[in-house]
Image (cartoon, rainbow, N blue to C red):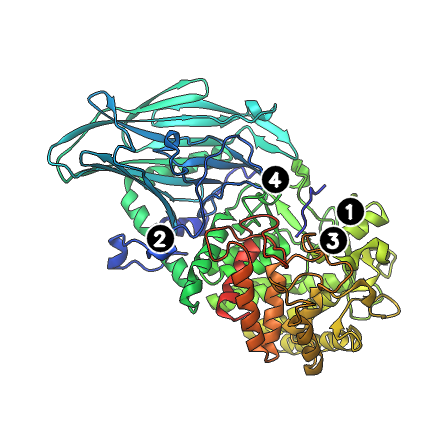
Amino acid sequence: MTRRRHRHSTAHRPLSALTALLLAGGALAVPQTAAAHGHPKPPPAYADVLDLHGTPTTAQPGDGEDNNPVTVFADRGAWHAYALPEAGDKDAYGGFSGPLYIAQEYPWWLSKSFSRIRLTEHGRTLDLAAGGAPRSTSLPGRLVQSYNLGRGLRLTLELRFATDRTALVRAEVRNTGPAPRTLGADWTGSLLRPADKPMRDAPSLTATGSGVGVDFAKVRETWDYLTDGTERFEVTHKDRVRTTVDGDTYRTEASKPVTLAPGRSHSFDWTESYTFTAAERTEERARVRDVLARPASVVSASDARWRGYVAGVTRGVPADRRRTAVKSLQTLVTNWRSAAGRIKHDGITPSISYKWFTGGIWAWDTWKQAVGTARFAPDLAQSQIRSMFDWQVRPDSRTRPQDAGMIPDVIFYNDPERGGGNWNERNSKPPLAAWAVWEVYAKSGDRAFLREMYPKLVAYQDWWYRNRDHDHNGLAEYGATVDPANDSPEERRLAAAWESGMDNAPRFDAGLGTGIVTNKAADGTLLGYSIDQESVDLNSYLAADQGYLARIAGAIGRGADARQWKQRSTATSAAVRNTMYDPADGWFHDIALGTGAPLTARGRGIEGAVPLWTGTASAAQARAVRDRLTDPAEFATTVPFPTVAKSSPYFSPTAYWRGPVWFDQAYFALGGLRRYGYGRDAEALTDRLLTHASGLAGDGPIMENYDPTTGAPLNSPNFSWSAALLLPMLTGDE
């Protein structure tokens, strides 16, 4: 995962079939039942699987590492999110923390708590904590707060997402006392302004006939804040209200009081929408009217959908690990972003909690995330794969026709033509797309999806061998594209390391000998660049994807293609097996371009276990690799499977790809052990990983990576591919 800055908003966003069905409780929902209509509460075991409590103090999230210290909740692909107030923070009672909104590519807090409800009786404000400290908790699919106001009054706040742009908040007041109560209600909130211009002047409050809105000025700060001046955050109340604005603060008041007889209740319902364009806003207002006309149905459909999600991720998971499965689920759903700007299909971003990962969709993240997402929402898994293939380079490309078939490294809300700095086509990412497509098909059974994806997957395979096989020997190299930013050997080497996904791994160090070669077509056309080594993980992935292409071709009735892909997979596997394994070292290594010498001096990296996951290794080779994977001095560390062996002189337990544990590599290693019959080893190492990786068993976030010697969390909390691949690890079916 590359942690770096990379060097059009749609005019009209039609209601996607996915969103429409979600609104109706369809595509990603489970069938309605009598129980669903009764709103049964999820099992208490799944309360607060993540600690979502916290109140922002500044508009810009960050803890010095660009991480947001407050974990948030979003759903349905919304571009805004919320948290729960801290216990004892009376100034935050009556509202939800935030929202956090994404300024196209970057997260910002709009308010400490934008919509705080206040109840009055006979002109006196009721104390929300009169009956003791409130209960504030997260449950699958919703945030809940419960207040005892004393003297028989109770207030319950629940927040769910109704659409991909709108949250629904219901504030139910119940009179459990013996006498009628007549109550007034109002809401207040204030903007949290960014500290620096021009971001400081971006948001502004506006009173509306049904609540309050926040408009945003146009700001094009490439690395911090991006708006077009068409964005809007809007609160819409079901009941009649009147609003006044005073600078950065507003007050909305219910037009008339509510009288509650003993045993009766009233629900104050409102929505909070965040849209990017005028066309979106027009469309969303119609959907908001529908939501507020039938809030109970929206709640019922949402709860049913989440029960289906929970059932999907916990199926086959031991009871003591199910909370971790639900935590993975919640992480993935919160990182789900719906189509917006140049992102044409719903996708999943790496983390809403890390500034540089909030608004982008990466290729190999997507392949891995789709495998996990398919367990609870196959339609969403398909959509996120499409989100990357939407930007597969076509033969008629104006800018890079020589890269036809390539998948870019990462796409964002803004492409370079719109001033996007994070969009990256300097390199691609490891080829695991056919694996992802097949795994999603295994859950959905959708052959139409296979037919749709097959020619695109073939074009991607062709690109690797046309643009990344320097000596045309059937073994590819990581490399760099013909791109203005790849303007020197060092920049090309850097892009090639990014293409591997293992950015700073020792095997790509210039100081250890990694260089760059030029790739040209037969007519002399410059195709790109390769590093001067053939990588074991890359070619094992290619062999695996060829095998999956054989399966896909067979499933859609292309028997001749299936036989050819199977033959190619066999040949690629044989080449890896025969050239990249060092018997003296008992490990698979990258090999030098030209000589084929294994690069053993650069140490053993976890990529040497990939040939077991792909079925490339011989039984004897797998046995030797297994010995390394289970050796505490090598890869069986406190949290197993560091990216560099503990014995390596380049091992550094906190240095990104030079030692920390990444769950994708753990997934490959565990799957490889199981594939070759070492299931007991896999079980023991899985248990060690789940036990010692900090926070997995409690309410801490799932991290990007972990210190292998201590289990301490390292980078990027609430990380999607970790969450996605935990799901199969929890059931032992890597």
Please say if 386 is above or below 126: below
Task: Mark 2 or mark 4: name the one nearer the start of the chain.
Answer: 2
Check disc 3 and report the residue beneath it.
504
Describe the element under mark 3 as helix, strand or loop.
loop
Describe the element under mark 1 as helix, strand or loop.
loop
Check disc 1 and report the residue beneath it.
483
Q: Crowdedness of circle 3 by 10 Å Cα count: few (<14), some, many (20+)?
A: some
Q: Which residue type carries mark 3?
A: Asn
Check disc 4 and report the residue beneath it.
66
The label nearer to you, 4 versus 1, is 4
Q: Judge left or right: residue 262 versus residue 570.
A: left
State the CA–CA distance, disc 1 to disc 3. 21 Å
Task: Mark 1 or mark 3: name the one nearer the start of the chain.
Answer: 1
Please say if 307 is above or below 416: below
Front one among 81 and 602: 602
Name the disc covering residue 25, or none.
2
